[in-house]
Image (cartoon, helix red, strand yellow):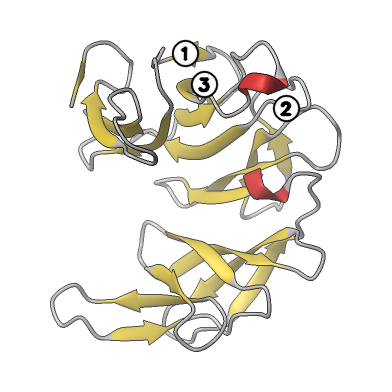
């Protein structure tokens, strides 16, 4: 699943990696659809639709019918850091990032897809703190995410590292102390390795590499 502006505005497409034939599964909008995230059963895709106010609305689309349904309206002071939807492996919960215009930074929210109740998972911080890119552990008991909540001031707001937190809000743990920027966490299907990007060996602008480590932190290999 991926986002493409091939028809003018960004829409969500899916493509079988064997026959490489794309099929559109969202109608798009003037501002565009992005950040597709598969459900565990492969029947739906959650994605972000940018609204007229630059807010990041959360939608879910049926892969067969391409019918999209609004899950949550976006209302963020810093919409650049909002979104990043991820459905839990049991298909019951949705994690995403938002600041809800509260002036306490961007936090990870957990949304119950059945009851439609949401709760803030990560602690509030300074206005420039950003908790983004949540990823569920294999047992859905923990979320790994990228954050700059360790930085002392807004001058260092682009310095991200990886953190983890239990689904009940306890056990906030910093996993990396990267000399560069660590982002884009991704767990291997077996759950025993955590991949992420890092700029620690950057020689030219925008250069990044992929590293691997245990989901609990520790030794890292390029």
Sort mark 3 into few (<14), some (14-19) or many (20+) by Cα contacts within 10 Å.
some
Q: Earlier in the sequence, mark 1 or mark 3?
A: 3
Residue 57 drawn at (x, y percent): 70, 62
Quarter of the image with the C terminus is top left
Quarter of the image with the N terminus is bottom left
Sort mark 1 into few (<14), some (14-19) or many (20+) by Cα contacts within 10 Å.
some
Whole-Å distance between the Cαs marked 2 and 1? 18 Å
Side of 4 where 150 appears, left or right: right
In front of the other: 161 or 18: 161
Whole-Å distance between the Cαs marked 1 and 3? 9 Å
Looking at the image, which residue is at 48% across and 87% down?
65
Residue 16 drawn at (x, y percent): 23, 76
Residue 73 drawn at (x, y percent): 77, 60
Residue 128: mark in rendering: 2
Sort mark 2 into few (<14), some (14-19) or many (20+) by Cα contacts within 10 Å.
many
Q: Earlier in the sequence, mark 2 or mark 1?
A: 2
Is residue 14 visible in the rendered image? The answer is yes
Side of 27 where 50 appears, left or right: right
Quarter residue 221 falls in: top left
**Residue with the mark numbered 1:** 174
Instruction: Kindly state the secondary structure of the residue where label 2 is placed.
Output: loop
């Amino acid at each position: 699943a991926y986002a493409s502006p091939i028809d003018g505005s960004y829409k969500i497409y899916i493509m079988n990696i064997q026959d490489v034939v794309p099929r559109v599964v969202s109608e798009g909008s003037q501002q565009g659809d992005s950040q597709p995230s598969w459900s565990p059963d492969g029947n739906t895709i959650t994605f972000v639709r940018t609204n007229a106010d630059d807010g990041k609305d959360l939608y879910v689309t049926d892969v067969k019918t391409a019918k999209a349904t609004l899950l949550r309206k976006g209302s963020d002071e810093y919409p650049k850091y909002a979104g990043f939807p991820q459905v839990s492996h049991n298909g019951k919960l949705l994690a995403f990032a938002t600041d809800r215009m509260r002036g306490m930074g961007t936090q990870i929210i957990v949304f119950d897809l059945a009851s439609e109740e949401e709760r803030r998972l990560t602690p509030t911080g300074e206005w420039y703190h950003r908790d983004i890119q949540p990823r569920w552990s294999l047992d859905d008991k923990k979320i790994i995410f990228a954050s700059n909540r360790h930085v002392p001031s807004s001058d260092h707001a682009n310095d991200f590292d990886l953190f983890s937190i239990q689904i009940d809000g306890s056990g906030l743990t910093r996993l990396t102390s990267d000399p560069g920027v660590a982002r884009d966490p991704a767990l291997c299907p077996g759950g025993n390795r955590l991949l992420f990007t890092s700029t620690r060996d950057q020689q030219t602008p925008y250069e990044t590499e992929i590293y691997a480590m245990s989901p609990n932190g520790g030794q890292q290999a390029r």
